Image: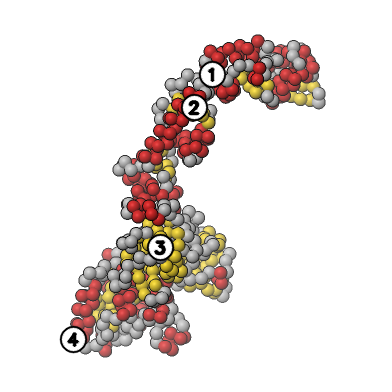
Amino acid sequence: MRTIATAGHVDHGKSSLVLALTGTDPDRWAEEKQRGMTIDLGFAFTRLDSGQAIGFVDVPGHVRFLKNMLAGVGSIDIALLVVAANEGWMPQSEEHLLVLELLGVSHGVVALSKADITDAATATATRRQIEDRLAASPFSRAPIVLCDAKTGRGISDVRAALDDTVKLAAAPVDWGRPRLWVDRAFSAQGAGTIVTGTLTRGRLAVGTEVLVGSPPRTARVRGIECAGVACDQAAPGSRVAINLVGIEHKSITRGDALVADEQWARPRVVDVALTPNGETKPLSRRGLLQAYIGSGEYEVDFRPIKSDSRFARIGLSGALPLAVGDRLILRDPGAESTVAGAEIIDLDPITKMSEAAYRLELPLPERALVRYPWLTLDDLVALTGTNTHHAQAVCTTLVEQNLGVAVADWVVRPETLAAIQHHATEKITAHYQEFPHSSGININAMAKELGITPDQARAALSAMPELEINQGQLRDRKHSDGATSPAAHELIVTLTATPFAPPAPSQLAVAPELIQTLLRTGQLIDLDGIIFSADALAQARQIVINEFKTKEQLTVADVRNLLGSTRKYVLPIVTWLDRTGVTRRRGDQRIAGPTSGLTK
């Protein structure tokens, strides 16, 4: 299904035309029927001659109900612009066209209505007037069809023009990330909560868990209707009614968004590129404006980034699921006028206002790298509201154009990576100068100093041929490891001279970093603050195992006598034997454990 919104001045026959095209009166309220004027959004469906299903969002034409009109056109990409042949181009024809242009809608049909009460000369003059007005607009090639809803004249031509236009318009994108801006929420007897809107960006299926509103509340899709027909799933571009469970309809209002995935970013501040209304003064001052996003109206804090009004920073009144490329309309509530359209360029920007303009002028891939110096696919998906396939293509483009470097799961700016690697090289060189026996620098400490995560540090530094990461230590491959130095050999000889009663480290004239290096390499072992050589513990292990060949049980005193040491040293050794499974404690006795090789 494709969704089409009407547009045009009040009393130009939009609702009557929709009725003639679909057989459904889109005016839902008694007041609308009594006054003969559309006040709120109306909806109707039909199938064109090609078989293409379309849904109409009929909008009010009176200036007092422009808010409702804006709620109806925020998610569509095709318009049916209605102009009465007898009256011609009018103020709301102009404003509605401006809104469509600012939202990026470029496909449509112009219905020259009320042909039954208009003579041929007037109709021809109105057609020329419309052609002149649209000549410089995105609708310059839109077909203009003379028609009359009352007699049915030209209705089949309007249907044919809509059919052709739908074929020309690009299909709605399916990023696998559905979003629906709610324009109605109500309760239906026997069904519960119903919300309606135009689905965008992805398919939505029955049974899907969704988030609704701000702050987001969880609900589940119990049913979906497209054009009044129940369906298992709806495609982007469809006008849908969704039956929700787990949420009350009174907690949902027009302007709330329904999304099916938590990866949507929910910014409270956005940077935008402006398209000013040419008839108003440039937006050069900070102030409060009304923003129309999706189907909602929001008061926002507007701050121009540059004096030429090309970019602005907008503070939202609430967090919304938005993406780069989303469009919105800005109106001045005091002047009651549309002052600009805006396209979102960045979400929750981290760049200072004074530095933002340069970044906003960059293409999206480069902007993304400025926003995320360590860019992941998930970052891009959240930023753009697309899918991982599209995000991967963007990352590939960055690497191919030498704008980024692929580092494990990230794409990193070349200058960022170079700065990290340069700093690490300087740091490790200085470290060895101060601690020549050190095995290196702890990678977590290095990451903290660099302001990145340990995983990022590993990815950035392990790619350097001169560096390596071993047992959590970053080291220079060319540096002589302290573990093999003469000082290390001398220390081990000293400790093994009295293997089961070694001297304390404080009694040895040894650099602390050398001991740490040997502990890390396993040549020394720390048992409750006593440093043993690994060979000494291996010797103790074998002595105990040999004793178990003739005895079933040993006490701590037995082990002390076997090793010729004191309880101070033997108790940590026995505890280590328990922990490694050589022995197993049974009361005050030890028996052979599973790693002794003596048990069945």
How many angstroms separate mark 1 from mark 4 (CA)? 101 Å
Q: Which is more foreground, mark 4 or mark 2? A: 2
The one nearer the camera, 443 or 535, is: 443
Q: Identify the residue under disc 3.
A: 303
Image quadrant holding the C terminus, namely: top right
Tell me which numbered mark, 1 or 4, is placed earlier along the sequence.
4
Q: Which is more foreground, mark 1 or mark 4? A: 1
Q: Identify the residue under disc 4.
A: 121
Where 22 sits versus 562, above or below? below
Tell me which numbered mark, 4 or 3, is placed earlier along the sequence.
4
Q: Secondary structure at mark 2?
A: helix
Discs 4, 3 touching: Cβ within 8 Å: no
Tell me which numbered mark, 4 or 2, is placed earlier along the sequence.
4
Q: Which is more foreground, mark 1 or mark 3? A: 3
Where 406 sits versus 20, above or below? above
Q: Identify the residue under disc 1.
A: 483
Q: Secondary structure at mark 3?
A: strand
Instruction: Give percent across and percent down for residue 403.
Output: 33, 43
How many angstroms separate mark 4 from mark 2 (CA)? 91 Å
Q: Amino acid type of disc 3?
A: Arg
Q: Identify the residue under disc 2.
A: 431
